[in-house]
Image (cartoon, grey):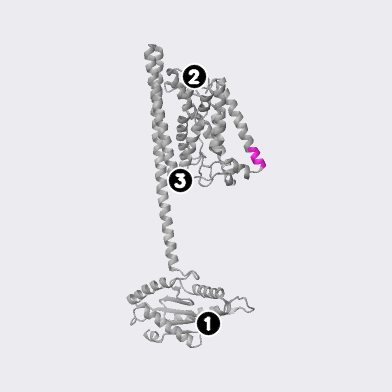
Amino acid sequence: MPGAALHAPSAPPAGPSSPDALRYRSVTLPLLLRHGSPTEKRWILGCWLASLLASVGLGLATVVYQWSGIALPFAGVQVYLTIYPPLIICLWWTLSFGWAWGAVPGYVATLTLALYAGMPTPWALLFAFANPLGFAVMSQSYRAVAVPLHMRSVHSVVFYILIAFVGAVFSSAGALIWIHTNRIDTVASLPIWQGWWLGGFLQSVLIVGPLLAVSWPRLARWQAQHPEYFQPESTDRKRRNLRLMLLITLGVLGYGMTTVWLGTNAVRQALGAGDSGKFLEATQTLVATTWAFYWVSAVVIVFVGFFGYRVFTYWIDSNDLLLQQVARTHAELRLASRTDMLTNLLNRRAMEEALQQQTQRCMRFAEPTALVMLDIDHFKAINDSHGHDVGDTVIRRVAQTITASIRTIDVSARWGGEEFLLILPNVDVAGATTLADRIREAIAGQTVPTEGAAALQFTVSLGIAMFHPKHPDHETWIKHADQALYAAKHGGRNRTAVWQEAVLAF
């Protein structure tokens, strides 16, 4: 921006401000005004206005004190830097609060500087977009890739350095407007343009980066406490990634074309003028910028590789997460398809499968196994007298008692409305009868509250059938248990009966 050389550059607005996801988010002024406390609004808006005024003043100082196009020796050649303090202020606001918070003071400061330097108003209005353009590139980069801005990991520092460079190159488009409006000759143009992007890049990395490392922890805590101030982020990650790659590609192509064009034009002009001094100066400048272009290309290659790695790992992680979700959903659906919703016991379908498997084990290993069928006595009368809610409570109580009484190797299911079925592996008739009586007595000792004055007591009847090798299909086994249950009901209820033929077999 300054007198003879250039204006400073880039600005990265990005920043994973979400304390959990570390994603870039922007503080929205209407939301801040609506939800913020009076003290908070005064502090934030007051500091922002002070920053705007400071940016304007420091921008003018850049022109007055000639902080642009400063020549410095580096690795045997001269490089050019522009010091532009408003960049530091506006970049911090961009990264910490959002693009608009840094772009507005950046635009106003650059516009004021341009008008003060005598730039025509139409050109000045266009010229002032230089730094906001760089801020926008950085903002889009952080929106596309979820990288934290705390500067406390190699990962976050490398990404910040790379994206600061890309932002600086984009903002250096303002140097071309400065060169055109000030009618600067070709030989002097390349140092001005280089000073613009290099100065902005170094200020972003060496000053704003450490400033973020110091301020980010406290800022992140504040953001975590006030999620209502932030606008929701778009979930279209694919489009954001494509937009970022397009910006990077355009930036590199524009940088390379500008470097070659300015360098070769400077050499041609010096040759045409026949001035050996100017020719030597132009050649040295071209060599310096050629090496700069090499390192820029190297940086961009690293960035693209880093970004590709990030996209690849994100894709892998997303696929793994999706597969886990599918597996979890499949397991939940399978469990739901096998579970009775009222009692959390197996349902009839799952019990059929368990009976088939246990039948095969009994046939192969001669494993004694009891099948117990349980039925709630007078259940229809309970429903008719007290309602279905009380009936459901009774069913749940029975299921809870069964679950508390059986072993982990036993299998229990709700077989029908008020009927339950139990498979008891490695149990003889005596053991099955003992367990059945224990369940029956535990249930008889319980009460269920009702709307009436007295609590409801209820009982169950149980039938036991041992597996019989002469009847190897599980349907016959169930039929035997049902016949034993019928005998218990017929014998007066609240009792246990055993299918006699099965008992004789063992």
Residue at 42%, 46% in the rendered image: 314
Residue type at numbered disc 1? His
Q: Do the residues labelled 3 and 2 touch (CB within 8 Å)?
A: no
Query: Callout 3: helix, strand or loop?
Result: loop
Q: Does the magenta stretch include residue 271?
A: no
State the residue position of label 3. Answer: 236
| Residue 500, image x, y percentages | 41, 87
Of the pair 33 and 346, the residue shown nearer to us: 33
Q: Between 296 and 468, which is closer to the camera in this rendering? A: 296
Q: Earlier in the sequence, mark 3 or mark 1?
A: 3
What amino acid type is highlighted by mark number 2?
Answer: Asn
* Type of amino acid at the residue the image marks with label 3: Asp
Label at residue 182 = 2
Instruction: Please name the residue shown 57% across and 46% down the image.
Output: 227
Instruction: Report the label total.
Output: 3
Give above or below for 381 relative to 301.
Answer: below
- Label 1 secondary element: loop
Query: Quick one: label 1, few (<14), some, or many (20+) residues within 10 Å?
Result: few
Measuring from the top left, give residue 196's x and y in whole percent.
48, 25
Disc 2, SS: loop
Label 1 belongs to which residue?
A: 378
Q: Distance between the residues labelled 3 and 2?
A: 43 Å
Magenta-drawn stretch contains 41 = yes
Q: Which quarter of the figure has residue 486? A: bottom left
Residue extending furthest right?
38
> Residue 327 placed where, x, y %?
41, 58
Which stretch appears magenta? 38-43
Which numbered disc, 1 or 2, marks the residue that appears first in the sequence?
2
Majority secondary structure of magenta residues: helix
